[in-house]
Amino acid sequence: MKKNLLVTLSIILFTTEILFPQIKPESFFIGKKSTMDKTALSSTPSSNSITDIIVVGDTVWLGMGTGVSLSTDRGATWTNFAGTPAFGTESISAIGYYKGTFWAATAHDENTSQGTVQTGSGLRYTTDAGKTWTTIPQPVDQESDSVITYGINKLSALPVTVPEQNVIFDMTFTPGTIWIASFAAGVRRSTDMGKTWQRVILPPDNLNSISPNDTLNFYYSPVAGKMSAVNNYNLEGFSILAINDSTIYAGTAGGINLTTDANSQYPSWTKFNHTNENNPISGNWVTALGYNNTDHTIWAGSWKANGETEFYAVSYSSDGGANWQTTLAQQKVYNFGIKDNQVIAASDAGAFRTSDNGKDWILPNTITDANTKISILTQSFYAAAFQGGSIWLGSGDGLARLVETGGMWQGTWKVYFASQPLASSSDAYAYPNPFNPRTDVLKIKYSTNGTEPVTIRILNFSMQVVKTIIQDANRGNPIHVVDSPSGTIDYWDGTDQAGNIVPNGVYFYRIDVGSQKPVYGKILVLQ
């Protein structure tokens, strides 16, 4: 399943140049098991950064900015695994589920002299709903792994020996096999629950197909290495999807690749990209794949990569990939939720939904909890899933569930909102921090000790007022007390008094509650 594209959200994300620097690995041990500490049930997931959702019957699994969460009762209660020995503070880059086994790929950012580097930290899986977890190290090569056999060919290859840049963005399953898609390490598969991994050979950029009986001569290197000064974009994995036991689609930075003999020792592959078909995908960077079992359409989040005529859109095919149609032009789609004739495209501009194969798309109205009045304030959504008559949406601003009782997007919303308890009546904090006003809304949490007049101002580094968010507004009523211990939350959209988005830099908030001493806090605006 898909992936946040590291929404911490870093996908998320990727840079448009598709560049990631590298550093030295961490150490993990194959087969090392960790039994979680007894985790109390919670009313909310432990994070508001929801990067992927898997629904199986009454069960909901979440991949998040930190750790995973599990509900076995359709969201009534949650078991949170962030901070447990299995996950610590790791971010979730991909999740998957197959025949009773749940998998999560983890990653984190590391600061180096070259800047911040996305670093893979392996996989974890559980066969007993999180009671125990098995930790698998990040798949890497030995220095000697410089030759790959593919059919009649022996190809020179770049060994990927470190986890830096080597982040798993998606996974899928066929009988007895887990398949992963990662940037620097490409597509790989394991037939022994992650103990060993095999590199999967896809067509290089200059070939539209490969088979094991072809005579091939190319250097297998997703990223620039010792023997190649350039990236091979079609070897860089970002999405992967099995639609049956032998058919797999693999999305890369160079297009979509199809095999119908996934279980063979050396699968053959056909590539579909923006330039090699009469009716092509919109762009070669394929961040998401989905399949509609009802009408057998394949859906792709196809982003602009390097070609001048490429563009962001959703691409879909009803003939296995021979021809593609495009819809939702200029939208960056991260994930799909599909049921019957319904498709939800989770994108940076909203959760778009269609029931007519992309002819018309409908966005939900304001997503506001019917009881708490908490709203999802971001436009960016990273995950969507159907569960019976309910719809789940994941964003960087929280999780939402719609119990649909009328037409499309009509019904009752519940918003799951996790926030840090306040240490005292004089405590306050703001999040997300750093804050990007182009994709998020800043939340400022503070205490009122009852209903009192509150003024909140945003100040610049010179302590000049940039914007007054509220002035002498009564706070502490049920609409604003949104969690326990009691706390009040107000919002800043990152604009100044004139409505302009403020430039990057350090800002401060000042909270005046009744006659109490003002409370200050720091905000880093980073776009």
Image: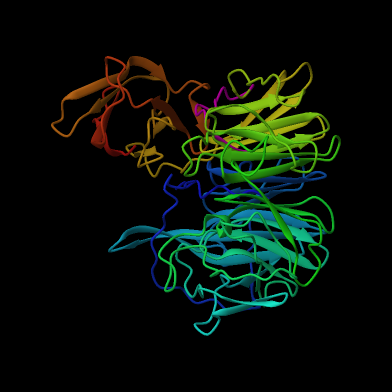
Residue closer to the observer: 293 or 150: 150
65 lies above or below 365? below
Residue 374 lies within the magenta run: yes
Residue closer to the observer: 298 or 59: 298
Would residue 400 be seen by someone viewing this image from the given angle? no
> What residue is at 34 percent from the left and 27 percent from the top?
494
* Side of 375 where 126 appears, left or right: right
* Side of 476 where 87 appears, left or right: right
Q: Quarter-wise, where is residue 34 in the image?
A: bottom right
- Secondary structure character of the magenta stretch overall: loop
Would residue 419 be seen by someone viewing this image from the given angle? yes
> What residue is at 58 percent from the left and 45 percent from the top?
287
> What residue is at 75 percent from the left and 40 percent from the top?
74
Residue closer to the observer: 89 or 253: 253
Q: Quarter-wise, where is residue 262 in the image?
A: bottom right
* Side of 161 where 204 appears, left or right: right
79 lies above or below 302? below
What are the residue bounds of the magenta stretch?
370-384
> What residue is at 68 percent from the left and 38 percent from the top?
336
380 lies above or below 291? above
Give coordinates of residue 389: x percent, y percent: 81, 29
Give coordinates of residue 58: x percent, y percent: 80, 43
Q: How is the image coloured?
A: rainbow
Residue with the most extreme bottom position: 144
| Quadrant (top left, top right, bottom left, bottom right) of the C terminus | top left
Residue with the most extreme front position: 215
Residue 430 lies within the magenta run: no
Give coordinates of residue 219: x percent, y percent: 53, 70
